[in-house]
Image (cartoon, helix red, strand yellow):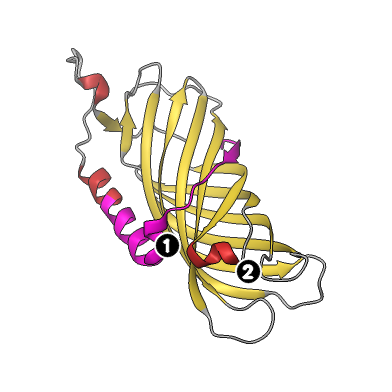
Amino acid sequence: MSISTAVLVAQPTPRAARHPFTCAALSVFGAMGMLATTPLISQAQSPTPLASTALAPAPRQSAWQLRFTSGALVPTGNQRNVLKDAQMSGVQLSWLVLPSVAVTGQLGWARSRDLGASNRPKLDVFTSDMGLEARPGTWFLGQAVSLSPFAGIGAGMRSYNYRQLDVNATNNLAGYGAVGGELGVGRVGLRLEARDYASGFKPLVGAGKSETRNDVVITAALRIRWHRTAPQ
């Protein structure tokens, strides 16, 4: 098991805001397809100059990974008129079911404000989801710096709750697509992940129809490995 902390920085993606769920799904499936079809090349006894840059099989690692995160949630499109950019904290737990496939669950808490209400009251945004990650292999395995790409997709719940107002919380379904990678230097791993969320959104106060909204989260998680990974 490994423990990590993270810092997130994100920028909105205007194109994704037009058709959030479609763009997220297409981009993630495309990335997963590219990763899955990349040949897994083992290091030979007498490697050629290109062998060090090929995608090698994923190194053996712990079946469970625990990551504590903190960073930012950035609304895009119409959601920017309702939610303020927010610092986000959370925890991720991954289970490596196969050498190249992991199940990842996440709980997140963002501290935002309702921009559509007077005095902009504080608003807690809670996210809970679960999804699959494809982790096909590692670039530059055995070198000073390695890179392990991944792509994922999942679904869960998004809840909005006023921190100080006596108003019932609203709960909505949410889906996401994710791409990223982990840079490895010795026993230290820097995990970079970009998630594009598409979620339902109900009026926080009063009546109204539910809409589909979009936001983007990018994470950078520091992971410490207890045992240095050796080339396979």
3 over 45 or under it: above or below: below
Residue ID at (49%, 52%): 104
Say few, some or many: other residues with alpha carbon within 10 Å of mark 2 (under 14 / 14 to 19 / 20 or more). Answer: some
Residue ID at (29%, 50%): 32
167 over 65 or under it: above or below: below
Q: Which residue is labeled 2 in the image?
A: 159
Given the image, on which type of amino acid does mark 2 rest? Answer: Ser
Task: Please state the horizontal and vertical placement of residue 71, each as a whole percent of the image.
Answer: 61, 44
State the mark number for residue 114: none
**Front residue of this view, candidates 26 and 139:** 26
| Residue 102 relative to residue 3: left or right | left
134 over 115 or under it: above or below: above
Of the numbered discs 1 and 2, the one sitting upstream in the chain is: 1
Q: Which residue is labeled 1 in the image?
A: 17
* SS class, disc 2: strand
| Residue 134 relative to residue 81: left or right | left
| Extreme residue toward the front, this view | 118
Residue ID at (55%, 49%): 93
Q: Quadrant of residue 45?
A: top left
Q: Is residue 18 magenta?
A: yes
Q: Which residues are magenta?
A: 1-30
**Front residue of this view, candidates 20 and 41:** 20
Task: Please state the horizontal and vertical placement of residue 203, each as a whole percent of the image.
Answer: 62, 78
* Mark 1 in CB contact with mark 2 (< 8 angstroms): no
| Residue 19 relative to residue 171: left or right | left
Task: Please state the horizontal and vertical placement of residue 16, each as a whole percent of the image.
Answer: 39, 59
